[in-house]
Image (cartoon, coloured by chain):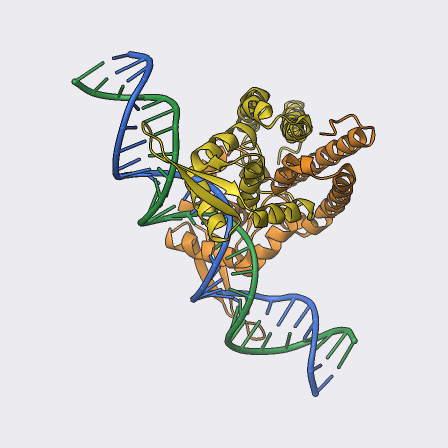
Chain colours: A orange, B yellow, C blue, D green
Amino acid sequence: MSLEYAILGFLHYHPYSGYDLKKAFDASIRHFWPADQSQIYRTLGRLTEQGLAEMEVVEQTERPDRKVYHITRAGLEVLSHWLRSTMPPQETRSAALIQVFFAGQLSDEEILAKFEEATQSMRAVLEVYQQVPQEIEEYVTAVGSPREEFFWMLTLELGIHSVQTQIDWMESVMQRIRNKEHPSK
Amino acid sequence: MSLEYAILGFLHYHPYSGYDLKKAFDASIRHFWPADQSQIYRTLGRLTEQGLAEMEVVEQTERPDRKVYHITRAGLEVLSHWLRSTMPPQETRSAALIQVFFAGQLSDEEILAKFEEATQSMRAVLEVYQQVPQEIEEYVTAVGSPREEFFWMLTLELGIHSVQTQIDWMESVMQRIRNKEHPSK
DNA sequence: TTTCTATATATGACTAGTATTATATAATAC
DNA sequence: GTATTATATAATACTAGTCATATATAGAAA
């Protein structure tokens, strides 16, 4: 389960609470692995059961107590082993492409409007991606490793290229439809 | 649920059994929506319950009887409505990028080997994609609509571009690491 | 004064998708 | 003669992830 490894990866940098982890995830890996709050807490529980992480209660007077987790030696080994294992194959699911696959029964005008709308939301995604470096900066200074930062930014780079590829493809499709270079039936 | 619409889309072309659908999915939309056999049968059951499809038993002497499903008027409406609705946002999950995100703790040699291996498996995916037109041809002749075929091929086109984008990115990363253009710590 | 936001953790109910196994028949390959 | 492949359907068990909601406190904004 990938979320386990992502959590171990962060705990390798620094001990965090579930709340901290949710914020770290949202600022850094959300663009390729969104994580639900409730799932983070449940996974932390499982990691603790498995002896890969350990929990320490940090009492606070003005806020609810924090449960801060740190990685164990066993956890470090599991993380290291996974990082050295073969890269998992990419997930391919795209509900949008199901719509495209069956789009032949729509009119050209409907298809163009659909692609136009989708192109615009892809551009909005690009803009969100461009803000990741700012959001991640807090962790850049905390971790203080330019090497780590280099790999963090590589994931963003692929995200941007991928979205751009989709935009280019959609524009090419729209152009072909506008130029009537496709079969009408 | 996307699989429901994908099944309705195929039933719109022609009545199919669960077994037929599994083959059709594997030949055509597998590259962006793989479908499990057991899930296809369960979804067919649900579509029938909802009145979106109807089942007919076709007796066979030498093989187990076939349960052939056809789309109902209600099913056509649901499909048409969904096809005209906004394109669902793309799924972003990539376990591979979690590995890249935390790759800083590996040696350059380990990272290069990892990327080399991943590039090769991406190239293998490209080759599989190049065989989709042959696998899909049976359905091209059966459906007999060049317009439908055009949109089918568009989904493949994006698949190929996306994989190529990943390969290009991985090669660029490898080059930067080989040229020591990245921080060593 | 109420509402919103932030801090902090947790459970219950649900959905989609995967993996395994079962049943049954017939042809083909080794 | 045995194993595999193809045709055909289906149940069971499981995992990962989502959604909604609950509890508790405090500061800031409206």
Could you tell me if residue A122 is visible in this image?
A: yes
Q: Which corner quadrant of the image does residue B152 belong to?
A: top right
Residue at image location 60% in from the left, 45% down from the top:
B76
Q: Nearer the viewer, residue B28 or A160?
A: B28
Q: Is A170 situated above or below A114? A: above
- On the picture, is A27 further left or further right than B49? right
Residue at image location 65% in from the left, 45% down from the top:
B80
Q: Nearer the viewer, residue B165 or A111?
A: A111
- On the picture, is A157 further left or further right than B76? right
Task: Tell me where residue D8 appears, x and y as whole percent.
Answer: 39, 34
Task: Tell me where residue A139 appears, x and y as whole percent.
Answer: 64, 50
Residue at image location 43% in from the left, 41% down from the top:
B56
Task: Tell me where residue A117 appears, x and y as whole percent.
Answer: 76, 45
- On the picture, is A99 further left or further right than A7? right
Q: Is A24 situated above or below B125? A: below
Q: Which corner quadrant of the image does residue B118 belong to?
A: top right
Task: Tell me where residue C15 appears, x and y as whole percent.
Answer: 50, 53
Could you tell me if residue A78 is visible in this image?
A: no
Q: Is B116 situated above or below C5? A: above
